[in-house]
Structures are given as C-alpha cells and as structure tokens.
Amino acid sequence: MISFECDYLTGAHPAILKRLMETNLAAESGYGEDEFSLSAKQKIAALCGTAPEQVFLLAGGTQTNQLVISTMLTHYEGVIAATTGHVESHEAGAIEFTGHKVLTVEEHDGKIRPEDLEAYMKTFTSDGNKDHMVQPGMVYISHPTEYGTLYGLQELKALRRICDEYGLYLYLDGARLGYGLASPDTDVSIRDIKDLTDVFYIGGTKCGALIGEALVFTKPENVPKYFFTSIKKHGDLLAKGRLVGIQFDVLFTDGLYSDICAHAMEMAVKLEKILKDKGLAIFRESPTNQKFVLLEDEVYERLSKDVKMSFWEKPDENHTAVRLATCWSTTEEDLKALEALL
C-alpha cells in the first residue's frame, strides 16, 4: 500500500529525530523556556523580521486557530472566512465553542476575493440593524487554501487595504505554508506575509515535524495581553515545550524547512504529470502539493486497494473526486508505484 492520503501521515524528518535523541537527557526548563525553543524563536523571528517575543510555539493547527481568534477578538466579534475555510468546515465548531461566530463569504478556488470581502463589509456597515448582529473583527485566510490554491501578492495587498479600512485583523493560517512558499507559481514571500498580515503561523505538523506550529504576531501590539496564560487556559501549553522547540530549531537551521518543502513540490509536479499523462481529469487545478483528480468509480475502487487517497466529493453518480498529496517524505519510488497502478 502506498499513501498519498495526506501530508502529515509519516513521522518526522530524520534530522529532527536525530536531534531529539541527542538532546534526550539534557535537563531543560519547561513551558517553552528551554534553550532549544528560545533558539527556534530567534531563528524564526530573524527570518520573518520580527522580535522573538512575537513568536510562540504551539502544538497544533486547530488549537492555534482557536487561540488566536478567541484572544484577539472581543466577546461580541466574529471572524470572516471562506465557506471552505478550515475554521468553518473542518474544526468541529472549535471557534464557535469559544463564543465567536464564523461569518462566511463564498469561496472562489478556496479563496476570499477582495471584492467579495469589500461587498460583505459595505453591506454590513450599511445595515440599520447591525447593532443586533455579530460584529466582524477578523478575516481568516489560509495559504495554501483547502484546495491547494495560493493568494497572489496583489490579492493580499487588497485584503490588507480592506481590513485597514474597516478595522479588521488579517490572520493567515499557514498549516502548509512551506509548500506554498516553495511553489513555482507564487509571488509571495514570508516577508510579504509578515508585512501584510497581523498574525500568521508557520506549519510544522504538515511540513516535517512530529507536531507543532510556529505562531508569529507581526507587530508587538498585536500580541494579546497575558497571551502565555491564555495558551495554558486553552490547553495548548506543553510542559515539555522543548518537544516543539527542538523540531523548529532543526527545521530552521541551514534551510532545512525550505529544502524539504521544495522536495515535496518537486514530487507534486511529477505527480501531476503522471496523472495527466494517464489521461485522468484534473478536478481542481492546484499549484501546490495537493492534487485533485476525478476518477471513474470503478477506477477509484480498484486503486483504493493499493493506494491511500483522500475522498473529496462525489460530483455525480459515476465519478469520485479525490485528493492526492505529496509531502517532505514522498519518494520517486512512490510515484513510480502509483504510475504502474494507473
């Protein structure tokens, strides 16, 4: 059985496991005050152009999204997201659980179009009953999106302008950020993201780490008061914070994060070529490591015996749309095995 099911199903990059073993018996302070976490924060801060005090190492994506949204917004505010946004569709109501409604706008290739956001805010602000409604306080986007698509630099600038006009935070979910930055189709850098958002995170779980995400507040004033305390209150504070710290310290040493994400993108380009050469219909175009293909049901059933894929949707009674994803650990042998089965 070969797997293209997702990009977080294998363990950790060997360099991370090696470093975890090397440091296993070192007695370090807890709760992220260890030397490895402090080193990781310094490296990430230098890369992004922020201060280490604006970087927080957290355990997972849903926890990070819930923590950011619930601490940056006041109790009467909600967060705007695309209908396909992760906080809306795949987080089991984690945002609503904290009392913050997810306010949706229609997705286009998984993204929020600036013109749709502007129309939403114009409609809201002109509504005579808006005082009876949840007040928008933040815009949530992911880069790459759930469909593997990317925001262009001009799109981010337009979203930033609208957020400034209406007093909204702009939050970027970067669970797969490494693959987005490595895409040959992107014109966005991590410094652009730092300059155009209020807060974002760099995904580790889907990009070579066992667990972990690195949250970056782009301005000191954006860090919520007593944020460390809120991390603990939300159950996202690891006593052995070194577990995440060591991983990010390794990922951001000698360009490892960029290298392994570039490898995943190289594999994705080859995967897409195989799919097209075999005459399969591309269900949604994606410039990143997630590839969406339309299979006849009998082909889907046959392949499923040897290939792990993610069911995506059933567009008609005879076809199934699936997602195949490459990652840092995908090999040429995986691709050759898939090609032979197709």
Image: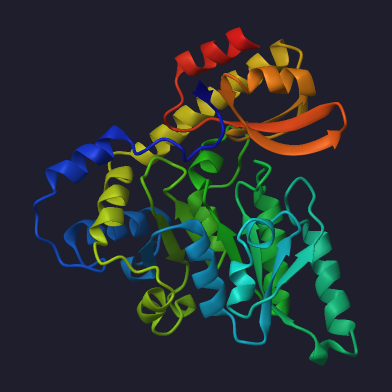
Q: Is residue 270 left or right of residue 311?
A: left
Q: Residue furthest top?
A: 340
Q: In which quadrant of the rendered view does residue 285 lie?
A: top right
Give coordinates of residue 232: x percent, y percent.
36, 75
Residue at horizontal 39 percent and vertical 33 percent from the top = 259
Colour mapping used in the image: rainbow
Residue at horizontal 26 percent and vertical 66 percent from the top = 32
Quick check: can you spot residue 291?
A: no
Give coordinates of residue 242: x percent, y percent.
24, 58
Give coordinates of residue 234: x percent, y percent.
44, 74
In the depicted structure, whether residue 252 falls above or below residue 221: above
Q: In which quadrant of the rendered view does residue 98 lie?
A: bottom right
Q: Is residue 298 left or right of residue 126?
A: left
Residue toward you, 249 or 255: 249
Residue toward you, 200 or 229: 229
Residue at horizontal 66 percent and vertical 75 percent from the top = 168
Quick check: can you spot residue 103?
A: yes
In the depicted structure, whether residue 169 falls above or below residue 196: below
Picture quarter with the C terminus: top right
- The count of marks equals 0
Give coordinates of residue 307: x percent, y percent.
58, 22
Q: Is residue 333 left or right of residue 17?
A: right
